[in-house]
Amino acid sequence: MDEKRVRSVPLFASLSKKGSRALAQQADEIDMPEGKELARAGEFAYEFFVITDGTADVTHDGEHVASLGPGDFFGEIGIVAAERRMADVVATSQMSLIVLTSQAFRALKRENPGVCDLIRAAVDERFAAEL
């Protein structure tokens, strides 16, 4: 993945060049069709997703929780805390996503902990907002 593309994502904009390069080496960019289920509540979480293009809906117990678009992300709690998915996420349009697997996250944690700290901070913000 291109490190300039990584830096264009608001979540990763503050990364150093070294951090951007490390993330670009570990992450993949994928396309998903409309209607694709990206996450299912209760399943183990193995990926963290950042939306670069397109939209998705988040539901919990059948109730709409949020609509996501470019710059939004999901799955971070699962890879940081090794938890099961908390909600369902379904693509509502064709999408492009940056994907970081839990294995890649662990590699980044060893090689460039600053990248993981940034993702952990996002998890902390989400938990704080829910309280």
Image (cartoon, helix red, strand yellow):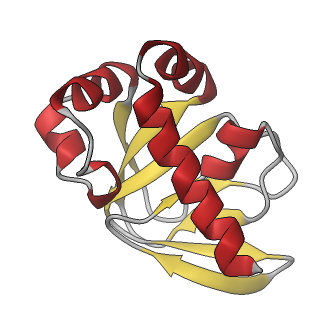
Q: Is residue 82 above or below residue 105?
A: below
Q: Nearer the viewer, residue 33 or 118?
A: 118
Indicate left or right for 21 with 129 as reference: left
The N terminus: image quadrant: top left
* Left or right, 62 with reference to 93: right
Residue 99: percent from left, percent from top: 45, 38
In which image quadrant can residue 89 be found?
A: bottom right
Q: Residue at x 23, y 51 (%)?
A: 13
- Image quadrant of residue 95? bottom left
Identify the residue shown where x is 59% and y is 82%: 66
55 to 20, vertically: above or below: below
Looking at the image, residue 39 sits to the left or right of residue 9; the answer is right
Left or right: 48, with 22 as reference point? right
Query: Residue 106's x, y, as percent?
Result: 59, 20
The percent coordinates of residue 33 (x first, y second) are 42, 56
Number of numbered discs: 0
